[in-house]
Amino acid sequence: MFRSASSSAYRLDVKYAALALLPALALFGCSSPGEAAGVGDVLAGKGPRVTVIDEVGDPVEGAEVWIVDHRSLRADVAVLASRITGDWVETAKAVAASIETTDANGLVRFPTAPTGGVLVAASKGSYFAALERRQIGSGKFEITLRPRIPYRVHVVDSEGKPAVGVAVSLAIPRGEAIERLPASARTDEDGVAILHEPPPEAFAARRDVDRGTVRLAVARIPAGSQPTAPVDPVGTGEIVLPPCGTVELIASHSQFSQDHWKGVVQLFAAKNGSRSDQTLAARFEGGRVTFKYVEVGIDLRAVAVIVEEDDPARRPVGAFSDRLEPVELPGEVRGRVLLLDKGAMIEGNAVNAKGEPFAGVPLTLMVENDPATTWTIMTDDRGGFRWLVTKTREGLDGALVLLRANGAKGTKTLPNVPLGSTVPLGTIELN
C-alpha cells in the first residue's frame, strides 16, 4: 500500500497516476464537513455521545470529533489520499460523514447514527485518538487524546532563503529505498514544516512499521532525486533544494474557455514514471495551477484529472498526461500548456434493454484497441455522461467506443470527429 507501483509500460504508468489522483480529487471537491453538518445543539441529536478526555482524565473542550463511514471510504483509501493531499488525520476530517466540536464538558453528540461500521476520531492540535466499531448506533463512547510525535524540518532554496509552501512528507528508510508514511505538511513563511507521526489507524494493514527507526523528511517537488534530511523529535532537519524555477500549467481547449476546467494535477520528473509518491497533487482551478519549486534541467511529466467547472457533482470527465520541456534557468517562471483538444468531448445516455437508464452507476468507457483511453465516470440520474478524450493512438474518426456498466456491455461507432469537437452519441443500449 505504501509503495508506489511503477510499470514499464507507459500507458499503465499514466493509468496508475490518474487513479492515484482520484481520491485527491474527491477531497479537493468537498466542502468542509463542519459546514455540512452544522454544530448547533449537539446534545439534541440522535447519534452517539462521545466524551473526549486528556491523559489525566480531564475533559477536553474544543476538540474536533468526526465519523468516517466505512461504507463510503475504506481506511486504505484514506491512506492513499493522504499520501497525495497531506496528513492522514486531516484527510480523515475532509472525508468525514459528520464533524462536531466538544463542549466545556468534553462532550459531543452527533445528529444521526451511521448504520455501518465506522471510525470515530478526535483531535486537538497535535493530539489524536480514534476507535473503530462494527456498529455504533446511539451509544456512549469515551476517547482519550494522546500526543503524536512532532518532527520539524527547515527547507531552504539553493540560495539559502526559506522555501515557502513546499510539501514535505515523513518517511522511513527501507534498505536503499525510502518508504513514505501518511503524514505531510507544507512549509510556512520561515520555511519550516512540522510533521506528526501518523496514528496507528493510518497504517491499515501495514502495522509492521518500526517506530524506533530513523525518520526522514522528504521534500516533494519535481526533482531528479528527492531532497531528504533525517529528523527526530528534539531537533530540526535541514533540507536544501536544488536550483529551481517555477512552472505554471495552463489548460487550453479550442471550444471552451480556460476557466471551464478544474480538478487536480501532478507534476513530476519524467524519469520517475508515474511515481505518485514523488509529489503532492495540486489543486487545478480556473484552468491554471502553479508549481513554485521545480528542479532545473529535468524532463517533466504532467498528469491531470479533469472536471468541468459547472458540474455540481464534480465528476471527473477525463485525464490528461504529457511530457513537458524542462525549466532551463534558476528562478525562471514559464508557462506550460496542457492541450486538452486533441481528442473530443463525447456525451450520451446509457440504458438497459428495457430502456431504463443506468442512473448513478460507474460507467467505464474505452476507445477500442486503445487501453490508454479507459475512463470510468458516474452517470447522472438519466444515465447521462460526458467523457473528455484528450488524445488517442490513431484518432477518433470511425472509432468504436466500448461501454460497460453493472455487467452490461455496449458499443457505439463514432462519426467523423473534428479535433476538439463535442460528439453527441444519443442513447446507447447496454445488454
Image (spheres, rainbow, N blue to C red):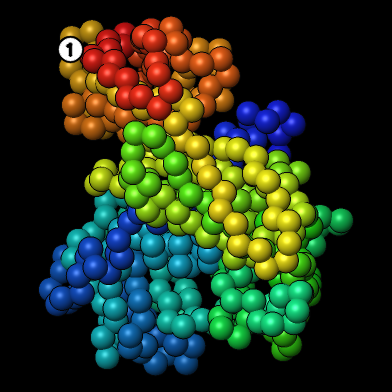
Q: Please count the marks in the image.
A: 1
256 up-or-down from 51: above or below: above
Residue 243 percent location from the top left of the image? 76, 67
Q: Is 216 left, or right, of 390 in this rendering?
A: right
Which residue shows up at 54% across the image and 56% down it?
248
Which residue shows up at 29% across the image and 81% down it?
102
184 up-or-down from 342: above or below: below
258 up-or-down from 173: above or below: above
Q: Is residue 74 visible?
A: no
* Of 32 and 336, the residue lying toward us: 336
302 up-or-down from 118: above or below: above
Could you tell me the amino acid type at mark 1?
Gly
Residue 343 percent location from the top left of the image? 46, 25
User: Dot 1 corresponds to which residue?
Assistant: 355
Q: State the residue lying farthest toward the right.
A: 176
Q: Is 386 left, or right, of 373 in this rendering?
A: left
Which residue shows up at 29% across the image and 78% down it?
101
**Within-10-Å neighbours for mark 1: few <14, some 14–19, many 20+:** few
Residue 413 percent location from the top left of the image? 38, 7
SS for dot 1: loop
Which residue shows up at 24% across the image and 68% down it?
35
**Image quarter hosting the C terminus:** top left
* Of 348 and 38, the residue lying toward us: 348
Q: Is 431 left, or right, of 153 in this rendering?
A: left
Q: Is residue 359 visible?
A: yes
Residue 194 percent location from the top left of the image? 60, 79
Residue 58, located in which quarter of the rendered image? bottom left
